[in-house]
Image (cartoon, coloured by chain):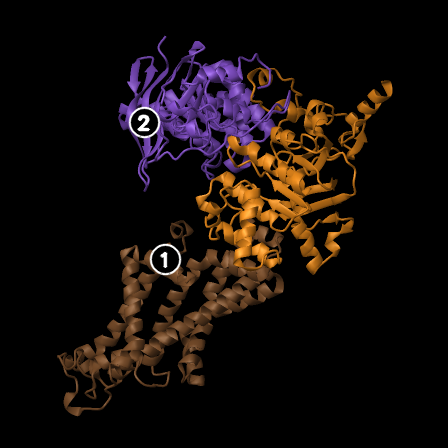
Chain colours: A purple, B orange, C brown
Amino acid sequence: MAPLLSVRDLVIHYRSPRGPVQAVRGVSFDIEPGEVTAVIGESGSGKTTLALGLIRLIPRSATVARGSIVFERKDGSADVLQMEPDELRAFRWRDAAMVFQSALNSFNPVIDIWSQFLDTGRAHGMSDPRAVRARAGELLELVHLEPERVLRAYPHELSGGMKQRVLIALSLLLGPRLLILDEPTTALDILTQRAIIDLLRDLRMKLGFAMVFISHDLSLAAELADRVLTMYAGRVVEEARVDDLFYRPRHPYSVGLLKAVPRVTGELGALESIAGSPPDLVRPPSGCAYHPRCPFAIDRCRVEDPALFPVDTPDHAAACIRWQTVAETVGTRRPAEAL
Amino acid sequence: MAVRDITVPGPPLVELDRVTRTFVTPGGTITAVDDVSLALTAGEAMCLVGESGCGKTTTGRLLAGLLRPTRGRVLYGGEDVWTKRGAEMAAFRRAVQLVHQDPYASLNPVRTVYDTLSAPLFRHGKAHGRRDARAKALELLTRVGLTPAEDFLAKYPHQLSGGQRQRVSIARALTVDPRLIVADEAVSMVDVSIRITLLDLLLKLRDESGVTIVLITHDLAVARYFARRGRIGVMYLGRIVELARTEALVSDPAHPYADALIGAIPEADPTVTRTKTRLPLRGSEVPSLLHIPPGCSFHPRCPLFEAGLCDVRVPELLPIPGERQVACHVAVRERANAAVRT
Amino acid sequence: MNVLRSLAGSVRLVARRPVGLLGLVGVTAFVLLAFLGPLVVPLHNAVSIPDVYKTPSLDHPLGTDFQGRDVLNQIVYGGRDILSVAFLAAFFSTAIAVTFGALGATVGGKVDAFILSLADIVLTVPHLIVLIVVAAVFRPNSFLVLAVLLASLQWAGLLRQVRAQVLSLKEREYVEAARSLDLGLFHIIFREMLPNMASYIAIHFIFAMTSAVYAQVGLTVLGIVPLSGANWGVMLYLAQTQGALYFSDSFWYILSPILAIVLFQLSLVALASGLEDVFNPRLRAV
């Protein structure tokens, strides 16, 4: 089966007074239908730019310098980067929808929820309000909200968790096959977070869409993802199935992230932060961009910038020439063992 | 790093004695903190945990003397601080320093790191002359791990990363040799990858100078790490519902709310997080502070709810076996029974 | 040394933008003209009947007035009072506004309410009429008295702005930290808050100068302020009362003070818009 979305050598730059900021530097990956992919990394790793780039929603100050993003439709494939404005607009809700982090506050405050659904439906060819109403009702019930009550409400009458559910329902209005979520639970309380996580998992089972979500929160990836991409300095440095990434990480940056996150249950383990700070993306370091912070770095890392290549298993790739040393140090853990 | 155990009993440094704080809002009067008592031992590192609106920030500001209690007393060295005025009150405020959440808002954008650090040094006679202030500022920057310190003196806040700003905020608090630091969500806005070093820094300062630290956070994992040898207080709608030693709390929470929180929190381990046992709640909506339910405020959501008891009587924070306190009728009864049986 | 360096830095930042550079050059030129000019150029105020209403020539670059006196000479001598009064009026009004605005916002309560109601009264009374009445009663014959009089009507707007700013800055975490550190009210107002309002205040200061220029010229032209020596307002007043409007040759006599006033005002406004960069710490630190 062909992948649902196929990204190849994507390069995105931002203009800045000091020169182009290389936010995404040659990223390639595939998303299979129905698969959940998490993109993890620190702020400034390029993960949000990548997510926006997938539906060509990057800000004006950014340009896609290179690459292709091929989306597989039932009636053939199309490159998102080559789409005409009309085609792109249709693509954005029908094929791939996005739930923004900031959207929690960016509902139009003077428009009730029903009108938000209606406007979105109309803009994408659902001309019959009854059809919109029926679909909205279905979706709101799926996200455990009472359609009658919620559709009549204005955004300020809803709690943060309810708004997030409404947004998810709204994003699914046109039945997209890909849902992109930017930090979907960051601003929410723990119990609300839990509810949203369970909801997303449940919706995916029922509706079968694929998800890409961007998060700095590793635990969200552990919860939801089938596959994880670790991003650093605009590159994907590791790509693995979720268990491989959490129990058998092979890129030192993934290892560093995992060691930096405390846990509530189980052993606390030895924790430490990653030394240093993310690189300047106007002038990324030579060789592997992670080498100035990397405990495994050797002289070769200063000059050589490895591409992703398979490690351990065919569907686990890391961009590190020292991955075998990393493997020896970190070992091959079984689940629920501390690092 | 050696973290000192805090069970060493001692007289409390700062104490909240049945403190209530209300605010008048357009919708009516809300009680942000309701009848909270909390005694902080000198040198302990504890955490207050809760979701938004639980009153943890207000509690922090009450501890820091920045808010006056509506009812109850704030004691420092056993004396009610709000009966004091002028120099004595100022001395108390100096003794308790707040480190804020937002490293972008907590430093004055038009003042350099040197300006920020030297002002309190001069004001309180800890530095005499520019050269001395400079030396002291360098020493503080080194203490908070900003090295080489010379590079930071002339910097404005916007030239620093979030973590570096947070370190400057901590250095600023240290200028007045505080006895208590209230760190309100001090690591929530910095990158995950560097949270641990900031927490370690606070613990190191505690070890060096014996300063008491209260970390306020919504993140139980952060709380567990920071207060691993100390206590965690869990707050819900303005009250402390459980106060216990950290390991006891995370491994065996007594209050159903604490239990639900710990079960719900996602963890950075796929197997653990997908197989965790969870306490299902009866309701998901957090009540508004304007309409706090009668009796135990958690009762509409609580799986242990007993009609006629929980919706009528407000549970007191009572001791249960194992050096812990819990505000739950059912948990107190069950744990006492269990203790009798064994 | 430090002051000099920061001044040089400010000048560099103002001059970064063409409009700021223009303003800076214009204002500097007027200040030099008004304060250094009289030291360099000798005063010619002898009446010379044969020279009445001469058009511009090499001898008289801006022509002559109704008594045959050189217009350029009057422009040079007539700037000092205008500029001094404008500067002093702006200074007094800013000082009043900042001090009491900050005080009201920090202290709050009755003090704040009193200050605020005073400001509201000043804001609502018609300024020109009050000026005319007060000027008629007191006959302000020194520029200091005139400056105080103008300032007394100008402070209210800025006071409200300063008060609002302080109210919002008071809630900032760094101000709270300063309170916690017991840095004192003086430090909090003048070291923590004021620098964050500096661009506001500087810009208000400049606009206060422009309105002070208009007010005093207006009062002079109306003949309410006693005529003392030469200033651009007096020139206009005399041009009007001596019927210069009816002579085509007196064109430059009327135009010169108007041009001086307008150019000075434009320079001030340009400087004000160039000032924004100066107070942005992101541009300060290199």
Q: Where, by quadrant of the figure, is residue C6 drawn? A: bottom left
Q: Position of residue B186 (x, y in %)?
A: 58, 39
Q: Position of residue B198 (x, y in %)?
A: 57, 36
Nearer the observer, A61 or C42: C42
Q: Around disc 1, counting alpha carbons within 10 Å, would you say few (fewer than 14), some (14 to 19), or many (20 or more)?
A: some
Residue under pointer 1: C9
Name the outermost residue toward the right.
Answer: B340
Q: Mark 1 lies on which chain?
A: C
Q: Where, by quadrant of the figure, is residue B5 drawn? A: top right
Instruction: Check disc 2 and give the amino acid type.
Output: Val
Residue C132 lies left or right of residue B162; in this view the side is: left
Name the outermost residue toward the front.
Answer: A299
The structure residue drawn at horizontal position 52% and vertical position 48%, both measured from the top left corner, is B107
**Is C110 above or below relative to A146?**
below
* Residue C176 seen anywhere in this rendered image of the structure: yes
* Residue A210 seen anywhere in this rendered image of the structure: no
**Is B213 above or below relative to C214?**
above
Residue under pointer 2: A11
The structure residue drawn at horizontal position 45% and vertical position 10%, both measured from the top left corner, is A312
- Front tag of 1 and 2: 1
**Is A26 above or below relative to B10?**
above
Q: Is mark 2 on a helix, strand or loop?
A: strand
Q: Where is residue A43 in the image (x, y as percent from the top left)?
A: 45, 32
Q: Which chain carries label 2?
A: A
Tell me the quarter of the image containing the C terminus of chain B: top right
Separation (CA) of disc 1 from disc 2: 39 Å
